[in-house]
Image: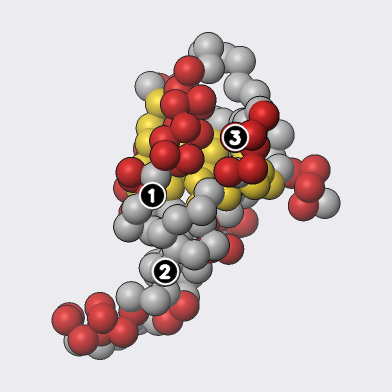
Amino acid sequence: MSLVGWSLGGIYAREIARAAPSAVRQVVTLGSPLRLRDRGRSNVSALLEAVRGPYEGSDQIQRPSEEARGPLPVPATAIFTRSDGVVPWRACLEIPSTTSESVEVFGSHSGLGLNPAALWVIADRLAQPEGTWRAFRAHGAAARLFRVEREEQRA
């Protein structure tokens, strides 16, 4: 099965893939704070504190860093936007590996689930035959809608 998760749903999708990699074909995340460790870095932190009040340990999310855990055991695509407005965009970048990528689209965090460019990437990922993961590539005029970061581009 392929798992698609938006925001915190992407974190859940990744955890499922780590727990049961033989059952998961790939993971696609949308604006998911994969690398967010400090809650104070989120644009919604002040709102959360106002609603629930401060609590001990509120400055750290209690889970190991993605870097320490390494890349997922299944192919992964992280869709993000620099103008997210909720999650810092750098926190949404996929862990570099030969079967992972980060695809930038233009839009907002709240709009990712309806964003035509994000939906295009999701459809492309889901249309791949099982066992033949390949990096996302937009062709022609559509290529201007995306920016893709891969392992070789980060080195």
State the residue position of label 3: 142
- Give the mark nearest the N terminus, 2 or 3: 2
Q: Which quadrant is the N terminus positioned in? A: top left
Q: Residue at x 41, y 59 (%)?
A: 108
Residue 112, numbered circle? 1
Q: Is residue 51 above or below residue 101?
A: below
Q: Nearer the viewer, residue 21 or 147?
A: 147
Instruction: Return the x and y of residue 141 as percentages of the image width and height.
Output: 64, 34
Circle 2 residue: 85
Nearer to the camera, 125 or 146: 146
- Inspect the image, locate mark 2, and give the three-letter code of the amino acid beneath it: Gly
Q: Farthest residue toward the left?
A: 51
Disc 3/disc 1 C-alpha distance (Å): 17 Å
Q: Residue at the spot x=54%, y=39% of the render?
A: 77
Between the residue at mark 2 and the residue at mark 1, the CA separation in whole angstroms equals 11 Å
Q: Tag 1 or tag 2, which sits nearer the N-term?
A: 2
Q: Is residue 87 left or right of residue 9?
A: right
**Circle 3: element type:** helix
Secondary structure type for disc 2: loop
Residue 131: x and y, percent? 57, 14
Q: Is residue 54 visible?
A: yes
The answer to which of 116 and 102 lies nearer the viewer is 116
Circle 3 Cα neighbour tier, 10 Å, few/some/many (<14 / 14–19 / ≥20): few
Vertical placement of residue 149 versus 3, above or below? below
In this orientation, which residue lies closer to the viewer: 107 or 135?
A: 107
Report whether 7 appears left or right of 126: left
Instruction: Please tell me which residue is depicted at 42% across the width and 69% down the height of the picture.
Output: 85
Element at badge 1?
A: helix
Q: Amino acid at mark 3?
A: Ala
